[in-house]
Amino acid sequence: MNRKEFEELVPFLYDEAIEHPFKSDETTAVFRHKANRKWFAVVMTISKNKLGIPSDGTIDIVNLKCAQEILDSLWQEKGIFPAYHMSKGHWLSVALDGSVDSDTIKWLLEISYDLTRTKIPRKKTK
C-alpha cells in the first residue's frame, strides 16, 4: 500500500477526513476522531535515515498507535519501525512503500483507531 492508497482508505473505512495541521509542512497529514479530536494516524514523508535505513532518500510512513504488548514483535517485521517523532512505547511507524502488506496495515489501522476512540465509561456495580 502506498501513501495515496492509505489516504483514500481511511475516509472509506472510518468517515474521517484528512487534515494538514502544520501550515509550514504540507507533507504531514493526520486523521483524527471527530468526537474526541485524538489522532489515530499521522502520515509523513521523512528521510529514510531517520528510521535507520542507510539512504539519502525519503520514504512515506504512517504512525499508528499500537498495543504495547505487541510492539516488540511488530518491530521485527520488514517495513515496521519504532515510531518516528512519537512515543515509541505506544506508537509505531509503518512504511507506505509496499513492504508491508495491505491486510497488516488495515489491521494496525483498526488497532490504532480503537485505542484512540472515545471510551464509554462502565457503570460501577455494587
Image: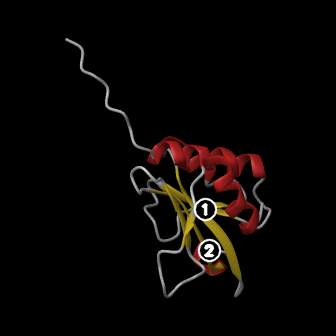
Asked if disc 1 and disc 2 are in contact, CB closer than 8 Å, the reply is yes
Which residue in the structure is indicated by mark 2?
52
Which residue in the structure is indicated by mark 1?
81
Residue 73 seen in the figure: yes
Which residue is located at x 69 percent, y 76 percent? Answer: 59
Name the colouring of the figure: secondary structure
Mark 1 or 2, which is nearer the eye?
1
Q: Amino acid at mark 2?
A: Gly
* Above or below 60: residue 15: above
Is 57 on the left or on the right of 38, as rendered?
right
Give the spatial CA distance, label 1 vs label 2: 9 Å
Q: Amino acid at mark 1?
A: Phe
Image quadrant in which you'd find residue 55: bottom right
Residue 79 seen in the figure: no
Percent across and percent down for residue 23 are 48, 84
Give the mark nearer the N terminus: 1 vs 2. Answer: 2
